[in-house]
């Protein structure tokens, strides 16, 4: 089979773009299933008999397999292409959703692990397909739109799921239907996604050779700077909003359930605006770092305002929207890490940054729950408790800003401004300089 990825990078490759569009739907669905537990914490608590730490640990199981399979998914895309890898990810997600909907504690644990494993193929696959379908000058914008639709799914997993499970169908059935939707999408993706790799020798197809590209990616210090900066900027969303956002608004600000769900959903909705907007700005001006630092600074200001200022100082819904727009900057390092590593390790670079980002989320989800329990000392999770625990997210944003100054600028404007190296003149045959 000819290598379909070996084409000029200045052209649009429509078969890959069509497959990218379906992978974006996959990303939307997995984000909806990722955020949905945040609006059913009372149901999970009563069904499984869990404490705040137990709920946080259950929901956080997702990130353990997500981070681990981010490495596997990147290697799979670089080795095998997307034709069969994307459907496998969707199948794992379908199994995980159905297990979670069985209503049994052990099945819920396993289901959350399967969901994380399958979801790890969504964004990596979308970036892989986008990098093969779009010209380089549109790549940051395409990645921004990918994350835009993902966070739209995250928002839908809150504002759309809440009324569903409290009026239309039991929470268990929501997960069953979500699993069936993932299974149907797997069949569609199998048909639509093109192949993208040349034939491999048996040695090249060995399991260990799949991970060879990570030697290049993980030996580059810039990869770690990108991963940790993005991971720290993700924490206020993955842990702060999607797990504890509704509880913070209900217990801290004493807002009704429906209103709290709608306000919490504004954070991922802000990503819908911020990811493509900041990606476009970074592409338009050819500079990555100023956009990254500017978005993170907006995040820091809004987070401090939400936690420590009177909650009516900003109009309702605006604070969550602004936090989400600013946190769209977390996607800029996903573009940079691809640009500071070789072209042949695109999938592995994305897998590596996903591993670093969601390993942080996997570690911080139970730690944040433990801090809440420790600070409350068995009492209610009121505003002072959340304010003390919120220092984790605030400190993480500040650290991400510091790390951003050490990330290499890879934008087109910076590349164009580099002085060109002149080749030394060679003397003519038989002569001397």
Image (cartoon, grey):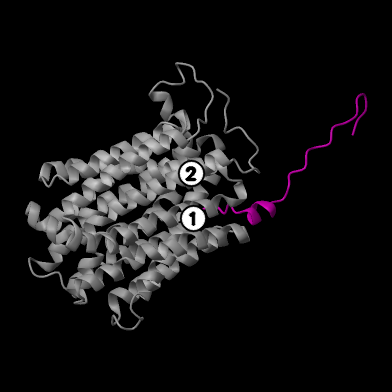
Mark 1 to mark 2 CA distance (whole Å): 13 Å
Q: Which mark is residue 301?
A: none
Vertical relation: 271 (above or below) 317:
above
The residue under the point 51% across, 43% down is 18
Residue position marked by numbered label 2 in the rendering: 20
Quadrant placement of the N terminus: top right
x then y, percent, for residue 5: 57, 33
Q: Is residue 37 magenta?
A: no
Where disc 2 sits, the SS reads helix
The residue under the point 17% across, 44% down is 109
Quadrant placement of the C terminus: top right
Sequence-first tag of 1 and 2: 2
Residue interval drawn in magenta: 406-433
Residue that protrudes farthest toward the right in the picture: 431
* Residue 214 visible to an observer of this rendering: no
Locate residue 40 relative to residue 46 in the image: left or right: right
């Amino acid at each position: 089979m000819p290598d379909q990825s070996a084409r000029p990078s200045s052209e649009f490759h429509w078969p890959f773009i069509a497959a990218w569009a379906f992978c974006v739907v996959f990303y939307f669905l997995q984000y909806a299933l990722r955020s949905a537990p945040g609006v059913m914490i009372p149901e999970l608590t009563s069904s499984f008999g869990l404490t705040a730490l137990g709920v946080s640990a259950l929901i956080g199981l997702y990130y353990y397999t997500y981070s681990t399979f981010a490495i596997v998914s990147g290697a799979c895309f670089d080795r095998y292409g997307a034709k069969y890898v994307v459907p496998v990810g969707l199948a794992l997600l379908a199994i995980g959703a159905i297990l979670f909907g069985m209503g049994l504690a052990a099945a819920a644990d396993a289901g959350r692990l399967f969901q994380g494993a399958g979801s790890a193929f969504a964004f990596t696959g979308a970036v892989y397909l986008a990098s093969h379908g779009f010209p380089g000058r549109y790549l940051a914008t395409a990645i921004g739109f990918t994350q835009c639709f993902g966070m739209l799914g995250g928002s839908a997993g809150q504002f759309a799921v809440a009324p569903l499970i409290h009026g239309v169908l039991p929470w268990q059935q929501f997960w069953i239907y979500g699993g069936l939707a993932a299974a149907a999408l797997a069949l569609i993706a199998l048909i639509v996604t093109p192949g993208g790799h040349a034939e491999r020798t048996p040695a090249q197809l060995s399991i260990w050779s799949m991970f060879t590209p990570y030697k290049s990616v993980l030996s580059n210090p810039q990869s770690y700077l990108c991963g940790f900066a993005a991971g720290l900027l993700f924490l206020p969303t993955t842990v702060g909003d999607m797990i504890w956002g509704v509880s913070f608004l209900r217990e801290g600000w004493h807002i009704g359930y429906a209103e709290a769900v709608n306000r919490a959903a504004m954070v991922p909705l802000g990503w819908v605006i911020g990811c493509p907007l900041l990606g476009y700005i970074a592409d338009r001006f050819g500079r990555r770092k100023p956009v990254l630092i500017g978005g993170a600074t907006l995040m820091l200001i809004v987070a401090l305002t939400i936690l420590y200022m009177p909650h009516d100082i900003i109009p309702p819904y605006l604070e969550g929207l602004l936090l989400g727009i600013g946190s769209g900057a977390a996607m800029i390092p996903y573009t940079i890490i691809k640009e500071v590593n070789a072209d042949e390790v695109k999938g592995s670079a994305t897998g590596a940054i996903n591993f670093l980002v969601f390993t942080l989320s996997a570690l911080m989800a139970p730690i944040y729950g433990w801090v809440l329990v420790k600070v409350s000392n068995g009492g209610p999770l009121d505003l002072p408790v959340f304010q003390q625990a919120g220092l984790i997210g605030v400190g993480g944003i500040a650290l991400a800003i510091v790390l951003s100054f050490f990330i290499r600028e890879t934008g087109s404007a910076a590349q164009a401004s580099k002085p060109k190296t002149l080749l030394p003149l060679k003397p003519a045959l038989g002569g001397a300089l």
